Image: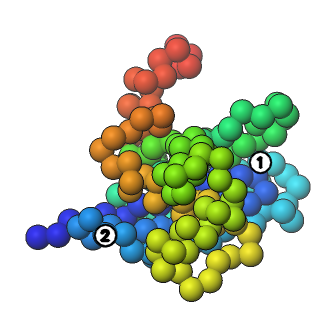
Amino acid sequence: MSTEKIILGIDPGTTIMGFGVIKIVGKKMEFVQMNELILTKYTDHYLKLKLIFERTIELIDTYNPDEIAIEAPFFGKNVQSMLKLGRAQGVAMAAGLSREIPITEYLPKKIKMAITGNGNASKEQVALMLKSLLDLKTLPKNLDATDGLAAAVCHFYNAGKVVGGKSYTGWSAFVKQNEKRVKK
């Protein structure tokens, strides 16, 4: 009896949200889908967050993932950008949590390391390695889709050994692991 699992990978962003879906059959990975949600034409940040939430719910309802892997925001100098990115990530996570799907966060360096063996690899290097690993015919113009796919592949490679990532199985687990952030 072979076990099957669907993993949804998300690279959250307020300009482009990349995502990829892989199917695990036994110990083999199969490419299912990758794409991106382009948000550049919208100026209202709250509308972007709503669209990220709705698209994530739509992906969950379409592919029925067993787990979600999400790229954690990296710490940059621009506080405003970090806040927006964190909100985008939070909204995508809330969509998964609302459907009781376990979520694991991975730092960008951890994802790059898992895919290429180099934590400082470029987006292009990650994309080319994914093309080879998953036997993809073409790569997308924007590499945000491959970043989302990379999160899913990283999660598959790290199955059962989460180091440098945080996992949440639902709202109660999130609250338990973040008690200091909960206002009573």
For residue 43, which quarter of the picture? bottom right
The residue beneath circle 2 is 28
Q: Position of residue 72 (x, y in %)?
A: 60, 41
For image coordinates 64% across by 77% down, the residue present is 139
> Please, what secondary structure does the residue beneath circle 1 have?
helix
Q: Amino acid at mark 2?
A: Lys
The residue beneath circle 1 is 46
Q: Position of residue 17 (x, y in %)?
A: 68, 59
Rendered image coloring scheme: rainbow
Q: Amino acid at mark 1?
A: Tyr
For the N terminus, which image quadrant? bottom left
Q: Determine crowd level at label 2: few under 14, some 14-19, many 20+ residues with C-alpha closer than 10 A.
A: few
For image coordinates 61% across by 61% down, the residue present is 126
Q: Position of residue 48 (x, y in %)?
A: 75, 54
The answer to whether residue 82 is seen in the rendering is yes
Distance Cα–Cα, label 1 vs label 2: 39 Å
| Image-based side of 133 in relation to 24, left or right | right
For residue 5, which quarter of the picture? bottom left
- 58 or 1, which lies in front? 1
Disc number for residue 81: none
Q: Position of residue 171 (x, y in %)?
A: 43, 35
Q: Is residue 53 above or below residue 21?
A: above
> Please, what secondary structure does the residue beneath circle 2 have?
strand
